[in-house]
Image (cartoon, coloured by chain):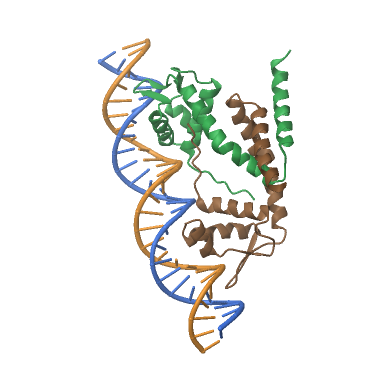
Chain colours: A brown, B green, C orange, D blue
Amino acid sequence: MIYQNERAIYMKIADRVCDDILSGKYQEDERVPSIRELAAEYEVNTNTVLRTFDILQRDEIIYQRRGIGVFVSPGARHKIRIARKHEFRQHELPEFLRRLRLLDMTIDDVVKAWNETKDSKDEAGTT
Amino acid sequence: MIYQNERAIYMKIADRVCDDILSGKYQEDERVPSIRELAAEYEVNTNTVLRTFDILQRDEIIYQRRGIGVFVSPGARHKIRIARKHEFRQHELPEFLRRLRLLDMTIDDVVKAWNETKDSKDEAGTT
DNA sequence: TTATGTGTCCTAAGTAAGTAAGACACTGCA
DNA sequence: TGCAGTGTCTTACTTACTTAGGACACATAA
């Protein structure tokens, strides 16, 4: 039985946007899809995306220009990396290992999965 | 920036109870703390814990006896393990590795953390 | 200037989650 | 029998989230 239930769509979208900045899909000072476009992509109301952008702007990840669009702030990528790494070490990793241990599993299972996904990437990169 | 925001306290409590069944804190056919006790422990309203027990009973993890208490169902531990393992392989592990990769980290960081927490447990078990 | 696409704001509504406080029914025990 | 502890249920209220639909302000290009 799994009971996680994370709601707040606008928060999840914020996380996705950060993902895309980290991965380089959105470069710094580059334009992000418009509120209406993102609302269509995620199939939510424009107000929901608006709330996403509210907190992203509050955290200086993006900046909005009335009538033009939304852009990635300079230094956003680095800022996200720092925050994510901290969160990872402090919470995600310990929680992950805790759940791993609760299932009597070992790190080998994780390493194996890592190598498998890594292999598929190598194949794409090679040849 | 981390935007997770998982609400629904009653779901988190359900997860905690399952943790405690997995770890052996609550044995099968053994009594679980009363609704009022758990409400006090987690500092929530009794109705919130009631909702937790509603879904745990629906999933046959527990059974309630009016006037007596709440008990762990026979086979609950096994049932939770199956569900958790499935969830782990299907979602938690892939998502974990994805986030790891987004941070340009490698599996070595995870192995290291695993060994460290494992060491501290070994010390407690030995001598 | 006008049209279009953008961000911004508003009101209205519904749902889920959580709290609060109390009442009732059942069980075991003194 | 009476009491205490339990699960159960009810009503009322607040808050956060999400949707819906529309309106306005601004910037750019035709």
Q: Is residue B41 visible?
A: no
Depth check, front residue: B122 or B47: B122
The vertical placement of B20 against A59, above or below, is above
Within the image, what quadrant is residue A14 found in? Answer: bottom right
Nearest the viewer among C18 and A28 is A28
Question: At which x and y percent is residue B23?
Answer: 56, 22
Vertical comparison of C11 with B62: above or below: below
User: Residue A111: horizontal and vertical position, in percent?
Assistant: 68, 32
Quadrant occupied by the C terminus of chain B = top right
Residue positioned 51% across, 23% down in the render: B21
Whether B20 is drawn above or below A90: the answer is above
Q: Quadrant of residue B89?
A: top right
Q: Front-most of D28 and A54?
A: D28
**Residue B48 placement: quadrant:** top left
Q: Is residue A81 positioned above or below B87 on the image?
A: below
Residue at left 54%, top 63%? A35
Residue B70 in picture, x, y percent from top left: 41, 23
Q: Position of residue B9 (x, y in %)?
A: 49, 39
Name the side, left or right, on which A87 lies relative to B78.
right
Numbered-mark total: 0
Residue B55 at least partly seen: yes
> As drawn, is D5 to the left or to the right of D25?
left
**What residue is drawn where x is 60% and y is 72%?**
A68
B38 sits left or right of B121 in the view: left
- Residue that lies at the very extreme toward the front in this rendered image: A127
**Residue nearest the observer in this picture, B116 or D15:** B116
